[in-house]
Image (spheres, rainbow, N blue to C red):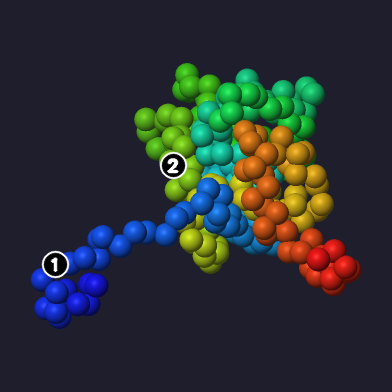
Amino acid sequence: LRYLHREGIVATDLACSVPRGRIYRQASLPTSIAWKDVARLLASIDRRSDVGKRDYAMLVLLASYGLRAREIAALCLDDVDWQHAQIDIPMRKGGHSTRYPLSATAGDAVIGYLQVRRTDVAHRQVFLTSRSPYAPMHHWAVSAMVSARMRNADIHVTRAGSHTLRHACVQHLVEADVPFKIIGDYVGHRSPATTLIYAKVAVHKLREFVIADAEDVL
């Protein structure tokens, strides 16, 4: 119809009258990267600089726990229980909180940043901007940092950001055959349906189904 209007065959552009195809909820595939690319991303960070230590700590938390950018930005110093090696993520998207065991990798990354973090500020948020006035990072800045770091590491994905690492975390757990209920609780999904979308990328499970006795089942 656009062509007909452009060629002058019809006087009115009727293209806008054509109904769009229906889009179903959870129909798309999660935008993720392979776990080897996550490791490559982390290895690309120069941790000799203060910014490098900060960004590395955020990337480790995002990938290890599947956190959202808002949860990283809201993380406070009091949320880390060093005595019991635990980390609290309060007021998640679903209105609940989660307490994780603090892994040695994540703990070392956070400590590495805290050793160079500004101490002359009143803010209790863990991650601060790198320039004066030193203030807590916004969630969009966290996501932009991830996108920039991925480009620098030559990792290309559509709409790269903090959710790319969240999806990578979930997909890594799916590939490790962790039950979907546990995965949903781990990353703070409000609905089981949100977690089940990752069944579409469980290629190893689909492969087992095809090469096994799938014909008898069907």
Q: Is residue 136 above or below residue 38?
A: above
Residue 125 vertical position relative to residue 166 in the rendered view, above or below: above
Residue beneath the point at 73% across and 31% down: 100
Mark 2 or 1 closer to N-term? Answer: 1
Which residue is located at x 54 percent, y 56 percent? Answer: 28
Q: Is residue 5 left or right of residue 64?
A: left
Q: Quadrant of residue 71?
A: top right
Q: Quadrant of the C terminus?
A: bottom right
The residue shown at (47%, 19%) is: 122
User: Is residue 49 positioned above or below 28 on the image?
Assistant: above
- Answer with left or right where residue 2 lies relative to residue 60: left
Q: Residue 41, position in %: x, y? A: 61, 58
How crowded pointer 2 is (Cα within 10 Å; few <14, some 14-19, many 20+) is rated as some
Identify residue for label 2.
141
Q: Amino acid at mark 1?
A: Thr
Q: Quadrant of the N terminus?
A: bottom left
Q: Secondary structure at mark 2?
A: helix
Quadrant hosting residue 53: top right
Q: Secondary structure at mark 1?
A: loop
Q: CA distance from mark 2 to mark 1?
A: 45 Å
Residue 97 picture location, percent across and down: 65, 24
Q: Position of residue 68 (x, y in %)?
A: 56, 39
Check disc 2 and give the amino acid type.
Ala
Residue that label 1 marks: 12
**Depth check, front residue: 192 or 24:** 24
